[in-house]
């Protein structure tokens, strides 16, 4: 299997992974749960109570998800701040640039020699906000699907004539939850929200890469740009090598053929020459 | 009257379930790691991270054209040889084919600029050429699975003179047909940006997407079913599948973006808009015999998507067959072993001129 040496803050992947971990936590708690026995004398319990507990669990799950997303958001904000701090560091080390910084910070339009840098920081900040909104939109869709599933679950239970066992209860929960989830998945709204989140996430990642590349270059460390340029060149070389490997045997075959034809021509010529030289003698 | 939970019954069920869970979990842990892909094979060639294998021990004399199997880039190909008793590769070998597998391996960061043309006109073409030289033949028989089927279709369309016959298993052709869930998810994503920013696409992300299509089934129902497994070999089979499901390679960034954008978003294959190595991929060039197998309940490749091959290919000998079951049932189910594998073997023999001559 593939070992990933480090994990990077990829919000789209993180969100999906967190949804998955909610299921996994459910399983873990099942494996460690001591077998429940009903309190003495009790033979049944209203499922409304159970539903309330399910809703509480969903609330707790989404709160945990939100906390994780906030954590990722803090990571991104820190990187953006670091990029800003790096810019300030560069400005401080260059008096000519530093003199313009105060004026530029106050000025709203992007003007002067630092306008590209200013624009980049503004774009980064806007993308961070956009990403946060996109995450919230997707989480809100997921929350609606869970709620819709529980509402359907409740209405199914209300139609049951007799008390249910655990297995029957699970089958109803699975049916309701899955249907609500698949409705969400099939909706254009979800497709748009997922696309928006993925695009924001990738856009932000790209901006952060550029911002950090500046810092790496300043420290004379290998940059991402250098790495991708090498990777691109490597691929070009591989293609060129493959072409040569294919062309060489074909060229060799053609040269061999040419040589063969020359030999044959020479052999045809030689007897003729021998005849004419013997006649001359 | 509000619905009620029968507490004594529920407590009994929970206790039984937990007892089963502890028993099965302990047995499963003891069986791991499980072996997969055990059929004997040898390496014929290795290009970068890509390997060409020959499945050795063909019982019948090698009178046939070599068979080259091409699997998807997304998962590992040992699903075709999960265990010797349920192995598509083994079954075709035992039926007399010289079976070869092109294993794409695990792309590394240095592979991020691999393009689809490198896969199709590079590695796949090199494999075909090598087999033609090795067996002193002009053509091979090609069998493509899922995305590997799409790549095989592209190869066959670009190099029809090299492909004697083509089998496609659960292969997407029309990427917008039949409400494809993957198209729906990919519809609004900017894959160019992904390729530029992300480098290779992580296996974790792809796994999460696939699990995200059916989380209730994959993360809940599947493990409840596991608790009911009494037979040790059946439990081993479950663990083999479990290993395969999450053993996924990263995807070379540029090739992944090309596939998602040009095939899924633009539906370029049926619109005649795909170009590889500067050459247009025309499905009408697929004039060799084709056997197209799809799964009736496939949630990844809807039947309509696979069936589009019949409409666009130029073959005069086109056969198609719907198999009852989901995406994977075509190569791992007992029914496939009993019914489909012999059909595939018979068809390969039918379109092998040397085998036909031998029959006379």
Image (cartoon, rainbow, N blue to C red):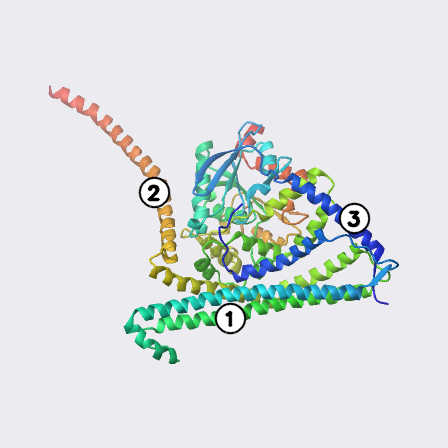
Which residue matches tag 1? A130
Which labelled disc corresponds to residue B16?
3
Q: Identify the chain of the residue marked 1, using the numbered disc in the image.
A: A
Q: Is any atom of residue A270 visible in this view?
A: yes
Residue B257, percent from left and from top: 48, 57
Number of callouts in the render?
3
Determine whether, in the image, residue A263 is placed left or right of residue B86: left
Measured Cα–Cα span from mark 2 to mark 3: 67 Å
Measured Cα–Cα span from mark 2 to mark 1: 48 Å
Same-chain status of marks 1 and 3: no
Which residue matches tag 2? A244
> Disc 1 vs disc 3: which is toward the camera?
3
The answer to whether B176 is drawn above or below residue A114 in the figure is above
Which labelled disc corresponds to residue B121?
none
Is disc 1 placed on a helix, strand or loop?
Answer: helix
Residue A140, percent from left and from top: 62, 69
Which of the two residues, A34 or B239, is positioned nearer the viewer here? A34
Residue for point 55% across, 53% down: B204
Location of the C terminus of chain A (image quadrant): top left
Location of the N terminus of chain A (image quadrant): top right
């Amino acid at each position: 299997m593939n070992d990933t040496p480090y994990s990077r803050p990829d919000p789209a992947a993180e969100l999906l992974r967190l949804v998955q971990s909610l299921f996994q936590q459910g399983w873990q708690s099942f494996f460690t749960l001591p077998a429940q026995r009903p309190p003495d004398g009790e033979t049944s319990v209203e499922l409304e109570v159970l539903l309330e507990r399910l809703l509480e669990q969903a609330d707790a799950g989404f709160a945990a998800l939100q906390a994780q997303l906030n954590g990722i958001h803090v990571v991104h904000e820190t990187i953006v701040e670091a990029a800003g701090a790096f810019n300030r560091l560069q400005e401080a080390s260059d008096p000519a640039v530093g003199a313009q910084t105060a004026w530029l910070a106050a000025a709203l339009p992007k003007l002067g020699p630092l306008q590209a840098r200013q624009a980049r920081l503004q774009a980064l900040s806007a993308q961070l906000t956009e990403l946060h909104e996109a995450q919230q939109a997707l989480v809100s869709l997921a929350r609606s699907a869970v709620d819709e599933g529980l509402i359907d679950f409740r209405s199914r239970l209300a139609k049951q004539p007799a008390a249910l066992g655990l297995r029957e209860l699970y089958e109803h929960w699975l049916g309701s939850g899955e249907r609500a989830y698949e409705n969400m998945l099939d909706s254009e709204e979800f497709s748009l929200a997922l696309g928006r989140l993925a695009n924001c996430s990738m856009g932000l990642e790209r901006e952060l890469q550029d911002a950090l590349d500046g810092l790496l270059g300043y420290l004379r460390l290998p940059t991402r740009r250098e790495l991708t340029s090498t990777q691109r060149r490597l691929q070009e070389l591989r293609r060129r090598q493959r072409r040569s490997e294919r062309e060489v045997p074909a060229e060799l075959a053609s040269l061999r053929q040419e040589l063969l034809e020359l030999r044959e021509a020479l052999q045809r010529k030689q007897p003729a020459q021998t005849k004419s030289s013997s006649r001359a003698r | 009257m509000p619905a009620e939970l029968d507490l004594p019954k529920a407590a009994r069920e929970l206790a039984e379930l937990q007892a089963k869970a502890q028993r099965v979990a302990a047995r499963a842990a003891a069986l791991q790691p499980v072996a997969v892909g055990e059929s004997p094979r040898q390496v014929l060639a290795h290009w970068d991270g890509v390997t060409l294998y020959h499945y050795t021990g063909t019982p019948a004399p090698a009178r046939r054209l070599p068979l080259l199997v091409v699997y998807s880039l997304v998962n590992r190909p040992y699903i075709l040889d999960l265990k010797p008793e349920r192995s598509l590769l083994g079954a075709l070998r035992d039926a007399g084919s010289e079976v070869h597998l092109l294993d794409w391996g695990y792309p590394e960061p240095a592979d991020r600029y691999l393009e689809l043309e490198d896969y199709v006109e590079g590695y796949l073409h090199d494999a075909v050429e090598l087999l033609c030289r090795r067996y002193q033949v002009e053509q091979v028989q090609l069998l493509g699975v899922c995305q590997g089927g799409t790549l095989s279709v592209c190869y066959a369309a670009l190099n029809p003179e090299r492909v004697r016959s083509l089998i496609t298993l659960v292969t997407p052709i029309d990427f917008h047909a039949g409400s494809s869930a993957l198209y729906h998810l990919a519809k609004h994503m900017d894959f160019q940006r992904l390729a530029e920013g992300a480098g290779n696409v992580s296996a974790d992300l792809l796994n999460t997407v696939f699990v995200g299509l059916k989380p209730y089934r994959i993360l809940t129902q599947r493990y409840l079913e596991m608790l009911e497994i009494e037979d040790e070999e059946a439990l081993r089979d479950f663990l083999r599948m479990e290993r395969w499901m999450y053993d996924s390679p990263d995807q070379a960034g540029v090739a992944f973006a090309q596939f998602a954008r040009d095939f899924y978003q633009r539906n370029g294959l049926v619109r005649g808009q795909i170009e590889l190595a500067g050459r247009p991929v025309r499905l009408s060039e697929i004039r060799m015999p084709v056997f197209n197998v799809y799964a009736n309940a496939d949630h990844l490749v809807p039947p309509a998507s696979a069936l589009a091959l019949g409409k666009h290919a130029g073959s005069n000998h086109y056969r198609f067959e719907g198999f009852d079951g989901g995406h994977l049932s075509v190569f791992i189910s007992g029914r496939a072993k009993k019914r489909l594998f012999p059909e595939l073997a018979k068809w390969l023999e039918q379109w092998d001129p040397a085998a036909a001559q031998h029959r006379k």
